[in-house]
Image: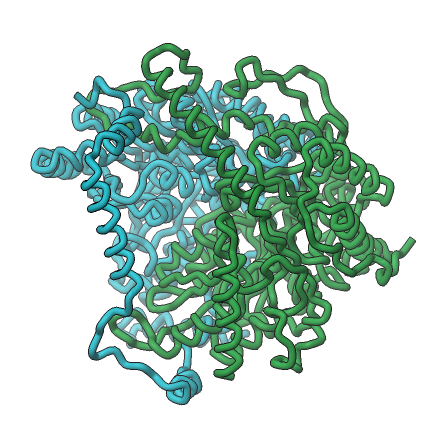
C-alpha cells in the first residue's frame, strides 16, 4: 500500500510541475490533458474495482498556453480600462450610472468601492447573459423575453417580444418540467383539494398526509429505510448538516462542493478541510492524517469524520469516484454525505443517481441527499438513509422545527414524476426518459469532442461544459446562440477559475435527436465565428450505440 | 485628505511609488522576497515532532472508533409520535381534519386565512397551465419568470420601498441577507429573543455579536455607548467596522412588538443600521398590513432592510427583502440563498401576487384579525392557572403555566397533554417547539396560539372554553389522580404507564 501511495503522489507532483501557468490547482493528480480512465491511470492496484474504472471516462484537457496568456491579457485590459473609467467617474468626466451608496454622515459605508470593481466594470458589460426573464415553463423550449439596454448593461427594458428558443440551460434532465400531462393534472387536483399553503412547520401542526406519502415514496425510490423532505433544496443541506456533525468532528469536503454544502458545513461548527476535486489519493492522505493525528492542538481523536461529496458536479460535469470513496469510508470508518442534486433521476439504469450508476448498495452511503428541483421538475430536497438517521433528523433538524413544510402541489409533482420514473404508473415512460437522456448525453458529448471543442467531464454526465476561456467570448457565445434559437448558460469567474470560463449545456430527455443536431449546428456556427475548437487531443472512443432506446 | 482623493488613487500611488524608488531599494526588496521564499519552503525545525511509522498509522486507523452518525431516537419518541398522531388529512386551513375529526385550527400561522381561498387556488391553477410546477433553475439561469419580476415589483410598491428581492424559502431570506452585508469584524447588536433563522444568519456572517436584553433599549444604548468609547480609542478600526441592529417586528417567541421609534432614534444617534425581520408582522400589523413600520407610522426609509416571509399571513412559500435599491441589489450577487438556489415555483409566486391583491382589496381583514386577537387575549386572561404572554393585538399568543414545575421537560409533557385533550374536543393547538441546545437562550415551555381573522365570536368563545377545560382537566388529573405521589414527575410517569397499558 505504502509503495502504491508513494507512486501516485509522485505522479501528481510531476503533474503539478507540468501544469501550465494558467492551470488551476484542482486539475492536479488526475488527468493532465488526457481523456482518462480510472484513477490516475494506474492499473493493477485495485483489481476489485477495475470494472467501474474500465468504464469511467473523464476528460479535462489542459488549457492551451497561448489561450491562457491571451485570456489573462484580456482580463488585464478590462481591469486597466475599469481603473481609468473609475477615475473618470470620480472626477465627474464620465457620468456614474450605477446605483451608488449615498453618503451618510457618520455611517460606515455598507460596501467598499474595490469590492464592487468587478461587478461595475466587468460583469456589467455582460450582464444581459444572465437573469434573462422567461415567460413560459422552463421545459424543452422556452419563451425568453427580449431585453434591450439603452446604457450598456446598467439598466434593461423589455421590448415586449418573446423569443421561442430551445432550452439547453435548465436542469430539466428527465423533462418533467411540463405544464400539461399526467403530473400537471395530478397537481391540479391537489391544488383544489389542499390549496397551496401550509403555514406551519412539521412539528407544529404542519405535517400532512401528502408529506407522509412523499417521504415513504422517496425512501422506496432510493432503496433506503427512511427519508425526509424539505421544501428548498439549498436549505436541505444548510439546515440539516448541523444536526449531523458538530464541534469536535471533521468535515472533509471536495473543493468544488456547492455553496449550500459549504454553508451547511460552516454552520455545523465542525472543522472543515477540503480535498482536491475528485482526487482519491488526496482524500485518503487527509483521512489518514486525520485519524492518526486527531484534532489540532489537543490531538484528541475526532468524534466523527464526514466526507462530503456531490454526485455530479454541475460546473465540471464530473462524476464522483464513488466506489473509491466508499472503500475509503469503510477503511477509515468515516461517514459519507452524498449530494445528488444533479444526479438523482439523471444517472443510473433506474434513474436512482450515482449509487445506481455504479451499482452500489444504497446502504453503503450513510446520507443520501438530493433535490427535486432538477429531474423531478418540482422544488425542495430530501435526505435518505437508515431509520435511525431519519428519526434523529425528524426530531432535531432545523427544517422540521423552524421552517414551513412543503407546499402540497409541489409535493404532488414529486410524487407523480417519481412514480412514473419507478414505472408505478404501469407504463415504460420513466424508463424511456432515462434511456433517452443517457443516449442524448453520449451522442451530444461525442459529437462535441469530434468537432474539436474542449469538453469537460464524464461521458455519462448530462451537464456538458464547453470551454470558452476568454471573457469576450463568453458574452458573444451566449448572445449568438440565443439569437440562433438556443438558450445556453455561460459561467465565469467567480463560479469558475478565472481563465476557465465556459458555456454549459444541460441535456434533457425531452431533447430529440433533431434538436441535438440543430444545437450542434448552432454551436458550430458560433464556434467557428469565435474559433472555439481548441482541442488538440483525438476524440475519445465512446459512443451512444450501446444504449437501447424505448420507442 | 482621504476624502478629497478618490480610492482609485491608491493604485496610482502604488505605480508611482515603484517608478520613483531608487535601484538599491529594488535590489533589497527582491533579496527580501527571495529570503522569505527560502524560509517558507525550507523544512521547519521542530524537535518534538513525532513521526509515525506506517505500521503505527495502521494500528491507529484500526483502533479508532468514531461516534455513531446519529444518536438512537426510539420510534416512540414523543415528537415522532406527536407528528404521526396529528398528521393532517387534506387542507391545513381554518379548520383541519385530524384523525377524521374536524378541528378549529389555532396552531398554524394562517392569520389572514389565505389557505383555502378559492381566488388563490384559481390563480395557482392558471399558473400551473403556463409554467408547470418547478422552475428548474436558479434565477440567473433561466429561472427568472415574469411572475417573479411582477411579484417583486408589487411587493416593493406595497411596502413603499425602491426594490424587493424574492427568495424561494422564508428561512433562507434573513439567514442569507445578514451575511450578505455583515462580514467578519463587523458588529451586530441583536435582541436576545430573535428567532432561529436570524440566529443562523448571525452565525453565517461570522461578525461580532452583541446581545441585548429583549426589548430593553437602555441595555442597547449602554452597549452602543460602550462601543463608541472603544471607537475613540481606535478610530482607524472604527472607520471600517459596520454596525447593525437586528430586531424582529413581532417576536415569534414572545408575541410582543419591538419599540421601533426608540430604535430609529438610536440608529441616527449612534449611526447604526437597522435590519428588521418582519416574518410575523408582515400582513399582520399596520393599517394596511405593511408591518411594524406602519404600526408605528414610521417611514420605511429609516429602516435599512426589511425581511418578510410569504409563508405565514400570505399562505404561500418563500420570502423577500426590501429597501433602497443600492442595498437590495447587492443581494442579487451576494445572497447565498438567492444565487445558488432554484427560484420559487412560479405557481407559488402567482399565489402570493393574488394574496397581496386580496389584502389590498379587503383591508378589513386586518381589523378583524386585530379584534379577534384582542378578544382572545381578554378571554384567555380569565383562565386560571395559566398566563398569556404577548401583546393583546398580536395574533401569536403563548400560553404558559402560571406555576411551572421547574423542570421544562415535565412542563412540556403537561402542555402536550393539554393539547391532546383540546384536540379531543376539536380544537387544534400546538406546543411551541425549539431545539433547546442550539438556541441562544432557553425558551420556556408554552402552547403557541395563532389567531385567524375569520374566526367568529362563537368559535372564539367555544375554543377558549375548550382550552380552559383542557387545562383544568389536565392539571386536576396531575394533582388528584395519585395523591400519594408527591412529585408531579412520577404522576406523569404513572400517567404514561397507564396510557401504555390501556393501549
Which residue is at a point 62% across and 17% down the rendered structure image?
Answer: A148
Query: Residue A491 vs residue B277: left or right?
Result: right
Indicate the colouring scheme: by chain
Query: Residue A381 vs residue A10: left or right?
Result: right
Looking at the image, which residue sits at the far right? A551
What percent of the width, then of the height, locates residue B283? 46, 29
Q: Which chain is cyan?
A: B
The answer to whether residue B341 is seen in the rendering is no
- In the displayed structure, B321 sits above or below A357; it is above
> Which image quadrant: the C terminus of chain B?
bottom right
What percent of the width, then of the height, locates residue B153? 53, 21
Which residue is at a point 45% across and 33% down the rendered structure image?
Answer: A76
Which residue is at a point 41% across and 19% down the rendered structure image?
Answer: A85
The answer to whether residue A441 is seen in the rendering is yes
- In the displayed structure, A85 sits above or below B109; it is above
> Residue B267 sits in which quadrant?
top left
Query: Residue B502 vs residue B55: left or right?
Result: right
What percent of the width, then of the height, locates residue A519? 78, 38
> Residue B271 sits in which quadrant?
top left
Depth order, front residue of B417/A486: A486
What percent of the width, then of the height, locates residue B157? 48, 18
Depth order, front residue of B421/A110: A110
Looking at the image, which residue sits at the far front? B23
Depth order, front residue of B46/A74: A74
> Chain A rendered in what hue?
green
> Which image quadrant: the N terminus of chain B?
top left
Amino acid at each position: 500500500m505504502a509503495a502504491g501511495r508513494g507512486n501516485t503522489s509522485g505522479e501528481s507532483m510531476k503533474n503539478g510541475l507540468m501544469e501550465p501557468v494558467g492551470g488551476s490547482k484542482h486539475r492536479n493528480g488526475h488527468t493532465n490533458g488526457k481523456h482518462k480512465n480510472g484513477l490516475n491511470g494506474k492499473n493493477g492496484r485495485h483489481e476489485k474495482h477495475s470494472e467501474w474504472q474500465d468504464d469511467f471516462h473523464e476528460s479535462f484537457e489542459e488549457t492551451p498556453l497561448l489561450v491562457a496568456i491571451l485570456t489573462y491579457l484580456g482580463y488585464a485590459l478590462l481591469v486597466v480600462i475599469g481603473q481609468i473609467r473609475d477615475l473618470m467617474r470620480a472626477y465627474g468626466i464620465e457620468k456614474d450610472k450605477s446605483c451608488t451608496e449615498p453618503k451618510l454622515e457618520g455611517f460606515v459605508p455598507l460596501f467598499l468601492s474595490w469590492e464592487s470593481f468587478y461587478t461595475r466594470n466587468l460583469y456589467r458589460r455582460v450582464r444581459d447573459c444572465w437573469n434573462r426573464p422567461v415567460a413560459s415553463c422552463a421545459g424543452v423550449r422556452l419563451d425568453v423575453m427580449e431585453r434591450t439596454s439603452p446604457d450598456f448593461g446598467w439598466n434593461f427594458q423589455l421590448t415586449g417580444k418573446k423569443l421561442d428558443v430551445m432550452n439547453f440551460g435548465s436542469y430539466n434532465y428527465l423533462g418533467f418540467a411540463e405544464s400539461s400531462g399526467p403530473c400537471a393534472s395530478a397537481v391540479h387536483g391537489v391544488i383544489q383539494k389542499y390549496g397551496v399553503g401550509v403555514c406551519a412547520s412539521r412539528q407544529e401542526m404542519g405535517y400532512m398526509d401528502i408529506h407522509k406519502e412523499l417521504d415513504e415514496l422517496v425512501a422506496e425510490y432510493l432503496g433506503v429505510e427512511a427519508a425526509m423532505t424539505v421544501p428548498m433544496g439549498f436549505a436541505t443541506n444548510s439546515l440539516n448538516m448541523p444536526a449531523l456533525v458538530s464541534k469536535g468532528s471533521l468535515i472533509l469536503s471536495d473543493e468544488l462542493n456547492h455553496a449550500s454544502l459549504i454553508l451547511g458545513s460552516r454552520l455545523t461548527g465542525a472543522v472543515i478541510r477540503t480535498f482536491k476535486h475528485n482526487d482519491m489519493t488526496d482524500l485518503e492522505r487527509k483521512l489518514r492524517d486525520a485519524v492518526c493525528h486527531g484534532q489540532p492542538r489537543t490531538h484528541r481523536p475526532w468524534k466523527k469524520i464526514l466526507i462530503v461529496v456531490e454526485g455530479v458536479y454541475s460546473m465540471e460535469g464530473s462524476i464522483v469516484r464513488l466506489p473509491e470513496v466508499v472503500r475509503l469510508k469503510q477503511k477509515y470508518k468515516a461517514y459519507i454525505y452524498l449530494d445528488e442534486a444533479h444526479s438523482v433521476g439523471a444517472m443510473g439504469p433506474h434513474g436512482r443517481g450515482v449509487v445506481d450508476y455504479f451499482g452500489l448498495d444504497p446502504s453503503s452511503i450513510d446520507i443520501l441527499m438530493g433535490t427535486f428541483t432538477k429531474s423531478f421538475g418540482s422544488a425542495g430536497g430530501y435526505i435518505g438513509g437508515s431509520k435511525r438517521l431519519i428519526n434523529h433528523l425528524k426530531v432535531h433538524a432545523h427544517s422540521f422545527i423552524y421552517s414551513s413544510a412543503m407546499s402540497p402541489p409541489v409535493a404532488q409533482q414529486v410524487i407523480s414524476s417519481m412514480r412514473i420514473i419507478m414505472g408505478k404508473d404501469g407504463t415504460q415512460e420513466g424508463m424511456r426518459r432515462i434511456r433517452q437522456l443517457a443516449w442524448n448525453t453520449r451522442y451530444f458529448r461525442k459529437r462535441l469532442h469530434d468537432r474539436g471543442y474542449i469538453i469537460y467531464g464524464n461521458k455519462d454526465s448530462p451537464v456538458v461544459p464547453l470551454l470558452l476561456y476568454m471573457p469576450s467570448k463568453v458574452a458573444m457565445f451566449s448572445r449568438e446562440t440565443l439569437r440562433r434559437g438556443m438558450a445556453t448558460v455561460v459561467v465565469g469567474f467567480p463560479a469558475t477559475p478565472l481563465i476557465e470560463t465556459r458555456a454549459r449545456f444541460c441535456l434533457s430527455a425531452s431533447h430529440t435527436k433533431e434538436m441535438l443536431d440543430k444545437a450542434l449546428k448552432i454551436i458550430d456556427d458560433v464556434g467557428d465565428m469565435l474559433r472555439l475548437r481548441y482541442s488538440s487531443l483525438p476524440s475519445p472512443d465512446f459512443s451512444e450505440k450501446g444504449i437501447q432506446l424505448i420507442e | 485628505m482621504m476624502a478629497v482623493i478618490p480610492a482609485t488613487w491608491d493604485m496610482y500611488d502604488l505605480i508611482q511609488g515603484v517608478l520613483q524608488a531608487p535601484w538599491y531599494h529594488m535590489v533589497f526588496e527582491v533579496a527580501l522576497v527571495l529570503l522569505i521564499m527560502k524560509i517558507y519552503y525550507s523544512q521547519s525545525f521542530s524537535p518534538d515532532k513525532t513521526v509515525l511509522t506506517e505500521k503505527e498509522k495502521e494500528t491507529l486507523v484500526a483502533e479508532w472508533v468514531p461516534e455513531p452518525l446519529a444518536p438512537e431516537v426510539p420510534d416512540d419518541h414523543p415528537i415522532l409520535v406527536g407528528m404521526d398522531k396529528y398528521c393532517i388529512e387534506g387542507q391545513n386551513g381554518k379548520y383541519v381534519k385530524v384523525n377524521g375529526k374536524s378541528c378549529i385550527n389555532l396552531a398554524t400561522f394562517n392569520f389572514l386565512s389565505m389557505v383555502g381561498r378559492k381566488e388563490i387556488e384559481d390563480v395557482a391553477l392558471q399558473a400551473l397551465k403556463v409554467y408547470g410546477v418547478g422552475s428548474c433553475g436558479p434565477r440567473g439561469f433561466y429561472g427568472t419568470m415574469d411572475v417573479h419580476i411582477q411579484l417583486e415589483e408589487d411587493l416593493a410598491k406595497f411596502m413603499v420601498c425602491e426594490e424587493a428581492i424574492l427568495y424561494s424559502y422564508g428561512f433562507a431570506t434573513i439567514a442569507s441577507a445578514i451575511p450578505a452585508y455583515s462580514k467578519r469584524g463587523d458588529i451586530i447588536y441583536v435582541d436576545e429573543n430573535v428567532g432561529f433563522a436570524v440566529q443562523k444568519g448571525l452565525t453565517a456572517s461570522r461578525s461580532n455579536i452583541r446581545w441585548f436584553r429583549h426589548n430593553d433599549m437602555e441595555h442597547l444604548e449602554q452597549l452602543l455607548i460602550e462601543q463608541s468609547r472603544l471607537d475613540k480609542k481606535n478610530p482607524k478600526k472604527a472607520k471600517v467596522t459596520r454596525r447593525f441592529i437586528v430586531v424582529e417586528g413581532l417576536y415569534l417567541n414572545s408575541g410582543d412588538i419591538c419599540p421601533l421609534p426608540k430604535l430609529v432614534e438610536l440608529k441616527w444617534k449612534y449611526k447604526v443600521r437597522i435590519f428588521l425581520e418582519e416574518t410575523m408582522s408582515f400582513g399582520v400589523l399596520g393599517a394596511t398590513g405593511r408591518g411594524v413600520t406602519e404600526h408605528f407610522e414610521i417611514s420605511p426609509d429609516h429602516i435599512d432592510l426589511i425581511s418578510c416571509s410569504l409563508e405565514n399571513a400570505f399562505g404561500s412559500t418563500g420570502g423577500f427583502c426590501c429597501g433602497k435599491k443600492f442595498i437590495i441589489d447587492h443581494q442579487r450577487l451576494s445572497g447565498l440563498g438567492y444565487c445558488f438556489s432554484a427560484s420559487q415555483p412560479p405557481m407559488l409566486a402567482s399565489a402570493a401576487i393574488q394574496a397581496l391583491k386580496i389584502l389590498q382589496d379587503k383591508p378589513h381583514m386586518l381589523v378583524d384579525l386585530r379584534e379577534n386577537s384582542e378578544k382572545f387575549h381578554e378571554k384567555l386572561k380569565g383562565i386560571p392557572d395559566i398566563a398569556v404572554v404577548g401583546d393583546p393585538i398580536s395574533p401569536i399568543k403563548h400560553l404558559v403555566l402560571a406555576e411551572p414545575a421547574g423542570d421544562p421537560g415535565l412542563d412540556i409533557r403537561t402542555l402536550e397533554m393539554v393539547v391532546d385533550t383540546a384536540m379531543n374536543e376539536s380544537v387544534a393547538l400546538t406546543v411551541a417547539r425549539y431545539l433547546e441546545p442550539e438556541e441562544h437562550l432557553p425558551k420556556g415551555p408554552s402552547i403557541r396560539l395563532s389567531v385567524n381573522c375569520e374566526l367568529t365570536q362563537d368559535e372564539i368563545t367555544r375554543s377558549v372554553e375548550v382550552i380552559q377545560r383542557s387545562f383544568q382537566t389536565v392539571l386536576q388529573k396531575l394533582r388528584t389522580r395519585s395523591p400519594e405521589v408527591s412529585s408531579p414527575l412520577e404522576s406523569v410517569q404513572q400517567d404514561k404507564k397507564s396510557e401504555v397499558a390501556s393501549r
